Image: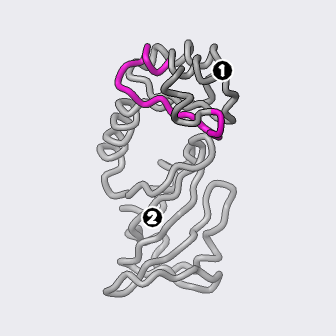
Amino acid sequence: MKTLEEANIADADAFVAATGNDEVNLLACILVKDFNPKKLIARISDPAHEDAFRKVGIDATVSPELTAASYLEKLIIRPKIADMVILGKGNAELLDIPVENEKVIGKKSGDISPTKEYIICAIYRGPENEIIIPEPDMVLEEGNKISILIKTKSIKKVMKMFIK
């Protein structure tokens, strides 16, 4: 408690317990709760411990091991796609996708986007991959790359539209 007080925990808006030991992180968060920070975040090594963290009122848990495993899985399953950002509670992603499928090459962006599943946010074209905010009459060309905001549950379906 003395260390927390010396660190001015009473003035903190958030507290993050990020040691490699789940028990230490849990205890630290429990001790900090008396200071009423707005947000408590803890690193967990064992995903089976997540329930215990939630039961004592910890707002969010982060597992570097699960995050890394998830990222590796995406690299294996979707090698042509670069993940940029996961949005919301993991129900949407912003991805970079190459335009390869002849079914969309030559189509106007406004004819295929937006839908309830995705929206094309940017088109990259030219030798320097110049970023262009798409207008409805812009034509997708072979070799373009697009940034697309997509609902996670629709990724496979939409990928097939753009990738060979």
> Which residue is pictured at 63% across the width and 46% down the height?
88
Of marks 2 and 1, the one in the foreground = 1
> Residue beneath label 1, please?
57
Q: In the rendered image, which quarter contains the N terminus?
A: top right
Disc tally is 2
- Tell me the magenta residue range: 10-26
- The kind of residue tagged 2 is Phe
Front one among 102 and 100:
100
Side (left or right) of 32 relative to 144: right
Q: Which residue is drawn at the image coordinates 58% and 76% (left, top)?
A: 109
Residue 42 pos. (x, y %):
50, 28
User: x, y (%) of residue 86?
Assistant: 52, 49
The residue to which callout 2 is attached is 162
Camera-nearest residue between 92 and 118: 92
Magenta stretch: includes residue 20: yes
Q: Classify residue 121 by image quadrant.
A: bottom right
**Position of the C terminus by quadrant:** bottom left
